[in-house]
Image (spheres, coloured by chain):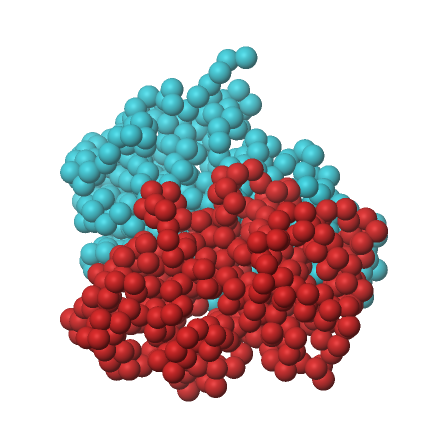
Chain colours: A cyan, B red
Amino acid sequence: MEIIQSMDLPNYFLADLPPEATLSPAMIEAACDTLRHNREKYLVPRRTQDLVQILCEVAAEWRRPDNLYRRLALASATGFSAPVVARGLDDFFSHFTPENFAALLRQDLGDRVITGDGPKAPHPATLVHHHFCHGPGLLAHVAAGNIPNPALMSLTLGLLTRSAQFMKCASGASLLPRLFAHSLYEADHKLGTCLELAEWPGGHAELEGALFAAADCVTATGSDETLAAIRARVPAATRLLGYGQRVSFGLITREVLQTETIAELVAGVADDVIAWDQNGCLSPHAIYVEERGAVESDQFAALLAAELMQRETVAPRGAISVAAAAEIATRRALYETLAAHRGDVKLWQSQGSTAWTVVFEHEVRFHFSPLNRFVFVKPVRDLAAVFQGVDELKGRVSTVAVAALPGRRPELAAQLARWGVTRICAPGRMQDPPLTWRHDGRPALGDLVTWTDYEWEPPREAESHENL
Amino acid sequence: MNKDLANFSSRLRETISQRPSTLGDPQFAELARELFVLQFQGNPVYRRLCEVRQQTPATVQQWTQIPCVPTSAFKELELTSIPPAERTAVFLSSGTTGQKNSRHFHGPESLALYEASLWHWFQPHFRVQQEFLFLTPGRAAAPGSSLVHMFETVAQAGPGAERHAFCGRVADDGVWTVDFEQAVQRLASAVAGARPLILLGTAFSFVHLLDFLAANGRRFQLPPGSQVMETGGYKNRSRVLPKAELHALITTRLGVERADIICEYGMSELSSQAYDATVAPPSASASPRVFRFPPWARVQIISPETGRETAEGEPGLIRVFDLANVFSVAALQTEDLGVRRGDGFELVGRATQAEPRGCSLMSA
């Protein structure tokens, strides 16, 4: 079998340099100058539809088993097992269709306006609009390192706004963004020259200072402290889109806890726990289960444990650090002790490893899971009890996966939305949001662009747009 | 009072006080087994856990197989064989606000053992004939602190108890502060009188003092023979300094060299402490300093992934078997990470209670 290694990739990006290469602020500045230049030349004139087509083609390539970049991703030390990476990438890239991109553009930028870069932009949509809409000239991303999809999505959105992009990857987490950038480079070299990726430990004042000074817009994903530190260093006139700490959980209503359908439901919840080993903001820390279903909440927990055990054989959890394992071991030890003394606490766990853990407890108060496939199952009377349990999380909840009969869904969704949840989905889809997902409730594409309003009467259909 | 445990306790106290060197591996193993049987019989909460794990006196062959209790269980359960009426003291963990505290109950015999244990391991590490200055409050203000109880004990046990002083205070909100005026006066007087001083406190109390000295442009050169005992933990009560930086500041501001700065590792759930140096370190700067417990307590480093003991040099969770924990549970699983180094261990961190993570804390 051919041995493939990511270090064999050509040196297109700073992140391709050998680890011993030292970055300097001057290198960042020079890279940003080049990016801006290339953007003017190669990206600004591109039609949105062309960009969408390239993205869809690249995505289709990634889903082919023999694709070089996919094989590299699966074979490399990403911290995830190959089946988990494969599933995560397949889910992600399956959304890349012209229809889905059209829906995203329509949702975030409106029906009548699609990005154009000036009156002469040869874009059919500009014939009817009377606004101009531009992406940032240079878009800087500070990507988080836990899971790769958000970084890939950031690059995708930046391409749609025809921005040159510089992505600062988290330490040890540049591989997948790099591979995606290489695949874009291969599909369209000119496009690739409008991308730059580099890796350095977060908080490097000089490198980040140079990057933020050059950028027109900065997106950052990280802890509240990380975001506060970045905010303090981004120039006031530069837009900062910060995506902070969010948590997610599941809610299973009693009507769907039926013996005939329970296996499918459990499989969906297991998908959510297993996806990226539960490391994303959209992964569930806890599953709230309504009491008095035909399948009781503790039976549900036992079934979930059995499912996680089975899945470990086909899609094992990745290796984790000693510190992460210690968090799991420490929590397990506590719940094991409690389980020995209280009938209302139960624990299921993998033997001889920390691969998966299910804790069943009646305490409704939300506890942060140490993640890496450690999930709480908490019986509740109703949704009001859930709100009581998650009260302290208000404003920080991203996704709630709701399993309910169609008749109950609208009312539950309305209540969750009123409470402040920004995404409600079905079990099994938590880590698989559509392209139109509004990140933390904000239009991810819409927030990148700037509008120019043109306050004369809109031209009549018959008028030529060329004179606008 | 459980007679068998009391009997074990008084025998151990005698051994600790009079012939600790007789506590070699076979003696330790024998005592550990004996204590396990007694705790299994005398501590129903512990017994239940052992039975669930199917690790009972009938199945446990070696002390390393004795089931341990996580320190966090002291927050949830009453892990003691002392009946409520006989409890004369309870040591609480100094958790951060909003967290439950650990509760380690004591009676007269268990306190006597605690005091014997702490004193007989403190003594070989500090120049106990010197004057002590404690940066913590005294017992009257902080009755639930095992650290303060320890300081009171060493203050009483050493010669010249009347020269010692506690310059910590407890603010209205329960937070410990340092009476800077008193501390500075004591430091100045030690320097003026050329009297070596032993300065003892928590890491955050040292940060408070050092920040105060820096803000006021004060520096002391404590007389030779002075020592510092610093014990970990910041509990959000001051800015957090890397250990090396804290120690460098202590040297700069107080004139105590690294070799005379001794770190303590202890917790309210234990009755023995570990120190990372002795009064006469052979080569303090060369090798990384390691913590050592007294001969009546042993440490294992456990892989959190597999639950088995790690190899030398590999990090894992610190497990302590403390014979002096007679009336609670001797086998304790801590939440601290360490690495075995020879007959000691290096402290490398803490398995913190899970914080919100998600996309968040991983950005680095």
Which residue lies at the image location 70% right of the left edge and 44% below the top edge? Answer: A350
x and y percentages locating residue A169 in the rendered image = 36, 41
The quadrant holding residue A388 is bottom right
Residue A365 visible in the snapshot: no
Question: In the shown orientation, is residue A73 left or right of residue A348?
Answer: left
Residue B213 horizontal side relative to residue A174, left or right:
left
Instruction: Please tell me which residue lies in front, B147 or B172.
Output: B147
The reply to whether residue A337 is in sight is yes
Query: Could you say where residue A76 lies in the image, as x and y percent from the top left?
Result: 48, 28
Looking at the image, residue B70 lies above or below residue B145: above
In percent of the image, x 46 and y 45: which residue is there? Answer: A146
Q: Residue at x 29, y 30 (%)?
A: A20
Horizontally, is B26 left or right of A302 in the view? left
Residue A10: give x, y in percent of width and height.
33, 21
User: Viewer-proximal residue, A20 or B14?
Assistant: B14
Q: Residue B65 in the image: state x and y as whole percent.
A: 71, 48
Residue drawn at x 38%, y 57% is B279
Question: Compared with residue B18, is residue A96 higher up or lower down, i.e. above or below?
Answer: above
Residue B66 lies, with reference to residue A45, above or below; the image says below
Splitting the image into 4 quarters, where does residue B112 fall?
bottom right
Name the one closer to the observer, A368 or A51: A368
